[in-house]
Amino acid sequence: SSDVCSSDLTAPFTDPVITRSEPYADKVSLLLHMNGTNGSTVITDSSPNALRVDALGGAQISTAQSKFGGSSVYFNGASSVLEFFPGSSMVFGGESFTVEAWIRLETLSSSWYLVDARNTGQTSNWAILYSSGGLDWFNGSTETIRTWNPVANTWYHVAFVRTYASCQFYIDGVPLGAPINDTTTFTVAPTASYIGSRFNGTERFQGYMDEFRITKGARYPENFTPPTTAHLTP
């Protein structure tokens, strides 16, 4: 007699397709892959908000260095800045959020801004900068510094994670000093924010940035392995 199961035995086997998922797909405020052709000033926000981003003062796509995707954005340290217009997408209140980027400093300077979410007079908003030999969290009224001594021409994954009232800097997934206690509530929507410069055009970053992302949520609540591929586009 025939074996009724024989067709199952001869059917071709197909490996299951495993795909990465983005758990914060609806919470990504800004995502800059910083991909493009060398010298381009077109910087695309790949978040669901599709925010306007202006490359000013010589900030441009460079294929000289990249972490992922074959390019990054180069900042000349004198006039370069990325200006973006977040509106309500960066009103975090007292909730958790994460700011992260891959950075490669071309030269070491005493102070530079990773991101400044303030405008003139908006003291209630926040900024992340490098100052006095460390990464500096500014909550609109108080600065808290965690010592860090970067090396020029080296890629680092820098992350700032706020988990409600507890804030933590990470370098390559390793906590940078003790957590920072901060209960500030951020209710003002920035009309403009700045990557690589202070809002008034001083303390500018010199070097390369790649995969810049801001998320409404604490992506990294403890030691973690830095991303090994480009961030997922929601």
Image (cartoon, rainbow, N blue to C red):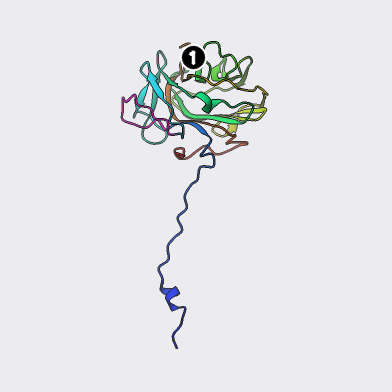
Q: In this view, does 210 lie above or below 147?
A: below
User: Residue at 46% of width from left, 83% of height from top?
Assistant: 3
The answer to whether any part of residue 158 appears in the image is no
* Picture quadrant where residue 182 is located: top right
Answer left or right for 207 relative to 167.
left
The reply to whether residue 30 is visible in this rendering is yes
Quadrant housing residue 165: top right
Image height of 103 relative to 77, above or below: below
Is residue 167 left or right of 70 when viewed as pictured? right
Tell me if residue 43 is in the magenta stretch. yes
* Residue 179, position as x, y percentages in the image: 66, 27
Q: Mark 1 points at which residue?
A: 199
The quadrant of the picture occupied by the N terminus is: bottom left
Q: Which residue lies furthest to the bottom in this view?
A: 1
Residue 70 shown in magenta = no
Q: Which residues, given as a range, are shown in magenta?
A: 33-46
In the image, residue 179 above or below residue 56: below
Query: Residue 206 appears at what percent x and percent y?
Result: 43, 19
Q: Position of residue 203 (x, y in %)?
A: 48, 13
Q: Residues within 10 Å of mark 1 (few under 14, many from 20)?
A: many
